[in-house]
Image (cartoon, helix red, strand yellow):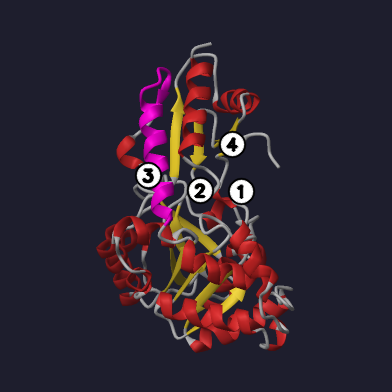
Amino acid sequence: MPEFVDFFSDTKTRPTTAMRAVMASAEVGDERAGEDPSVNRLVARCAELLGKPAALYLPSGTMCNEIALAVHCRPGDEVICDRTSHLIGFEGGGPAALAGVMLTPLAGDRGRFDAAQLGAVLRPDRPYAPRQRLVEVEQTANLGGGTIWPLMQLQAVAAAARAHGLVTHMDGARLLNAVVASGVAAADYARDFDSVWIDFSKGLGTPGGAVLAGSADFIHEATRLKLRWGGAMRQSGIIAAACDYALDHHVERLADDHANAAALARGIAAIDGLAIDLAGVETNLVYFDVLRDGLDAPQLCAALLARGVRMGEMGARTVRAVTHLDVDSAAVEKALAALRAEMAV
């Protein structure tokens, strides 16, 4: 058990006692053969949640993204995404290594580009240029600060892509955070996108797992790549049962994470030497900057850890703190006390 309160990421959540009990009693079978009833129930439920005909259970959200690119695209194709996209910075070069695609980054507003920006890079299909094939969005936008794409902006981007003959993909790692914060249904956010996925190992608090959804043909091909890339499992209903439990018990409570993030942000705003955009804290991600001379983000994070609080440096001056299932209001107060003490040194 860690001896600190952990704001490093919402991937640091641990299964609750009730979730562990559900996992221990889960009905299981051979997932690879389509015989695990817990997995089958979960994917059917997620397909309905996301408004898609079919869905596929996968070990991770990164695999969801990589499989989606490889199904939609061919080597040499071009994928258009925001410059802060998870595809670019956090998937080990997978888009190039696995799907063989080129990534064209757009300079969006805190992780969200608009239809005009997309239109500015679209071009006629000519043999000497890479084929533009896919437009990708991330809901919420992590490096944008957990920002929520407005529904109308998503619709406009998808319409511009479709008018140019491109397919669309949504990285929905924190899609349910957007749903809870905005009141817009997941299926409404996903409606105009050819593929979409949700993660269970972040704010929903499971030990792993993600579900990728799309058309029946898309999922058929995605299943082939799941097997090819070694993602098939056996009695994975043990984890799928945790995901099902999370949909019942851990979605609405994401509002608590958002409230704790807002409280943390307000406290940070009152500390000399730190800077934060309060309006930019929309969900559970809190980004702030270190302004004091002689102190940078890595140094501050090391000092906080010594005081029992873990956060993550996201650059020379920027720190990220993430609220989640294992971080309550008392943890927020401990973090603020540590920040006040360190900035007073």
Q: What element carries label 3?
A: helix
First to last magenta residue range? 253-275
Label 2 environment density (alpha carbons within 10 Å; few <14, some 14–19, many ≥20): many
Answer yes or no: is residue 59 visible. no
Q: Which of 70 and 242 is in front in this view?
A: 242
Q: How far apart are marks 4 and 3 (CA)?
A: 17 Å
Give the quadrant of the N terminus: top right
Q: Earlier in the sequence, mark 1 or mark 2?
A: 1
Residue 9 in the image: state x and y as whole percent.
56, 46
Q: Which of marks 4 and 3 is nearer the N terminus?
A: 4
Which residue bears the numbered disc 3? 259
Which residue bears the numbered disc 1? 12
Q: Are marks 1 and 2 in contact (CB under 8 Å)?
A: yes
**How many labels were placed on the picture?**
4
| Magenta span includes 266 | yes
Q: Distance between the residues labelled 2 and 3?
A: 11 Å
Which residue bears the numbered disc 2? 324
Identify the amino acid type marked 1. Lys
Which residue bears the numbered disc 4? 5
> What is the magenta segment's predominant secondary structure?
helix
Q: Distance between the residues labelled 1 and 4?
A: 10 Å
Identify the amino acid type marked 4. Val
- The residue that appears at 55% across and 55% down in the rendered structure is 202
Label 3 environment density (alpha carbons within 10 Å; few <14, some 14–19, many ≥20): some
Identify the amino acid type marked 3. Ala
Residue 247 in the image: state x and y as whole percent.
48, 68
Label 1 environment density (alpha carbons within 10 Å; few <14, some 14–19, many ≥20): many
